[in-house]
Every structure is written in structure tokens, then in C-alpha cells.
Amino acid sequence: MTRIAIDLNVRVRGQQTYAGFEDVLDGDHPHPGDFVEVFERESGVFGKAQVTDIDSDRELIYLAVDWAHLAEPTVPHFFRYRTATAAAAFVEGPAEDVFLASAGGNAATPITGPLAQV
């Protein structure tokens, strides 16, 4: 299912919201009538929405969010992880966005090995 990041404080057209094309993170580019998963990056709150309109000129997607059924994540949205490798490092951030910088500091690599919550 397509995932789109939204800002919970933005309301347009009554109780709708919008997101930019750049906020589509997973899945195909949505079309009017499609159902998508929406979430807020800061809080991790997520839920369902229906695409009501696409403004291709402004690169905006209008969404009818099911505001009453937005849910909190069942695990804390932000974790502090310790890598289980010899090059141990601590990183903070949403679980899906945890990266480890290279020794040279010029690249970031997703951590794919075992992680321990600390």
C-alpha cells in the first residue's frame, strides 16, 4: 500500500489535508479514489486516507483522512539503538530511518544487522 507523510496540523477543504509528491514514500504514485496509508514523521501516528484529488501543476495530493481512527504506534516511535558489531555506534531516530555513517563520514549505510534497544 502506498505510504504518504502528512502534517497533522494542515487542513484544507473542510477536514481534508494535502501532501506533496515528495511525501510519497512507498508504493505507486496514487490516483483519485485510491486508499493509502498516511503517517506523521514526528509522532509516528498513522492511519488510512482516500486520495480525493491530484494537482499535477502544484505536485499536491489531496487526502480525505480518517481522522477519528488515526493510531499511535504500538512501540515507541524513536529508539536508541546499539549496533551488535565491533564498530559499535549509537544512533537515534525512527526504526525505519536508522543509518550508520561510514568511518570516512561521507556516506550513510542502513543498519541491517541485529539491533538492540538500549
Image (cartoon, helix red, strand yellow):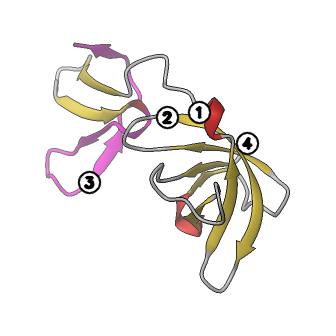
Whether tag 1 and tag 2 are in contact, CB under 8 A, the answer is: yes
Front of the two marks 4 and 1: 1
Secondary structure at badge 1 equals loop
For the residues labelled 2 and 4, the Cα–Cα distance comes to 17 Å
Indicate the amino acid at tag 3.
Ala
Decide: is 77 above or below 64.
Answer: above
Indicate the amino acid at tag 4.
Met
Residue at x-position 16% and y-position 24%: 88
Residue 1 numbered mark, or none: 4
Residue linked to disc 3:
107
In reply to whether residue 42 is colored magenta, the answer given is no
| Along the viewing direction, whichever of 88 and 69 lies nearer the viewer | 69
Mark 3 or 1, nearer chain start: 1
What stretch of residues is rendered in magenta?
96-118
Residue linked to disc 2:
45
The image shows residue 77 at horizontal and vertical percentages of 38, 28
Mark 4 or 1, nearer chain start: 4
For the residues labelled 3 and 4, the Cα–Cα distance comes to 30 Å
Residue linked to disc 1:
70
Residue at x-position 21% and y-position 32%: 91
